[in-house]
């Protein structure tokens, strides 16, 4: 029995802390000795974790890896598909992490022509309706996988937007809610330069999220991301 996890930075493993990027982000390895995915592994008592996640990827990238591995799903396996922002797309085949054009356009390594093309896209071609339709299509596709693979238990966990069997999402209701105001949040990111919280949440909320995910798999309880989490951890007085 396996736990399969697919997603973006909300599912990056604890090992990231010891990488060059994790050290630069000043993630505290003494605090993050575990994360919510590790805790779910323990709760489900699975034999192995199959993890496919990367910073900044799109739902297309996540979908590709789910479909590639779907033939390896076995009855009684657990699958968590952590959905990402609908405005991310797999624009560049060799750069799946460059899915957010609004952020990528500021990349100093990109050529003037590439930046100009992105700016033109954002000005003339960006279409929220199309993004939302693709997002919905991806969700329905995953729901088909759930039906087509008898016995598996699948959770679609939204990083943004909405998903079936969940209330709220990880960004609005967990990550951002740890700040007492938008001004405090901006000050935090300006100070750290990169989110120093593994999976964009404090360690207390990792345990809470793991409990909710475990309850979903054991009791089919919808994952409510709007209640029960620690909020206002960061204030104007401690950032």
Image: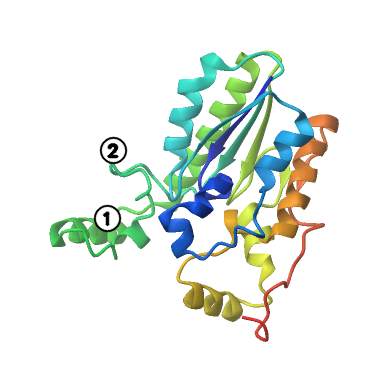
The secondary structure type at the circle numbered 1 is: helix
Measured in 3D between alpha carbons, the distance from the residue under mark 1 to the one under mark 2, in whole angstroms, is: 17 Å
| Residue at screen point 63% across, 61% down | 175
Query: Vertically, is 126 above or below 139?
Result: below
| Residue at screen point 52% across, 14% down | 71
- Can the viewer see residue 132 in this picture? yes
From the viewer's side, name the closer residue of 136 and 165.
165
Left or right: where does residue 141 sit relative to residue 112? right
Q: Residues within 10 Å of mark 2 (few under 14, many from 20)?
A: few
From the viewer's side, name the closer residue of 70 and 91.
70
Percent x, y of residue 137: 51, 33
Left or right: where does residue 35 sit relative to residue 210? left
- Can the viewer see residue 165 in this picture? no
Percent x, y of residue 74: 63, 14
Mark earlier in primary sequence (1, 2)? 2
Percent x, y of residue 204: 75, 59
Looking at this view, name the residue that lies furthest to the bottom: 237
Q: Label 2: which residue?
A: 93
Q: What quarter of the picture does the C terminus occupy?
A: bottom right
Query: Vertically, is 72 above or below 235?
Result: above
Percent x, y of residue 23: 47, 61
| Residue at screen point 56% across, 44% down | 13
Protein image colouring: rainbow
Q: Which numbered disc covers residue 121?
A: 1
Disc number lying in front (1 or 2) = 2
Q: Which numbered disc covers residue 97?
A: none
């Amino acid at each position: 029995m396996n736990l399969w996890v697919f997603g973006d930075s909300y599912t990056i493993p604890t090992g990231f802390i010891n990488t060059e990027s994790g050290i630069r982000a000043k993630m505290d390895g003494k605090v993050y000795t575990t994360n919510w995915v590790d805790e779910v592994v323990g709760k489900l008592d699975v034999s192995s974790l199959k993890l496919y996640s990367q910073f900044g990827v799109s739902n297309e990238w996540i979908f590709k890896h789910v479909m590639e591995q779907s033939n390896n799903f076995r009855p009684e396996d657990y699958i968590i598909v952590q959905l990402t922002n609908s405005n991310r797309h797999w624009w560049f085949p060799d750069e799946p992490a460059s899915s957010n054009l609004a952020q990528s356009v500021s990349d100093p390594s990109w050529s003037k022509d590439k930046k100009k093309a992105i700016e033109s896209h954002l000005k003339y071609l960006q279409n929220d309706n199309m993004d939302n339709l693709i997002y919905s299509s991806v969700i329905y596709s995953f729901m088909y996988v759930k039906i087509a693979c008898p016995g598996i238990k699948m959770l679609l966990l939204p990083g943004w937007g909405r998903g079936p069997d969940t209330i709220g999402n990880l960004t609005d209701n967990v990550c951002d809610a740890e700040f007492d105001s938008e001004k405090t949040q901006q000050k935090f990111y300006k100070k750290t330069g990169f989110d120093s919280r593994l999976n964009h949440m404090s360690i207390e909320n990792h345990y809470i999220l793991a409990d909710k995910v475990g309850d979903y798999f054991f009791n089919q309880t919808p994952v409510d991301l709007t209640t029960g989490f620690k909020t206002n951890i960061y204030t104007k007085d401690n950032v």
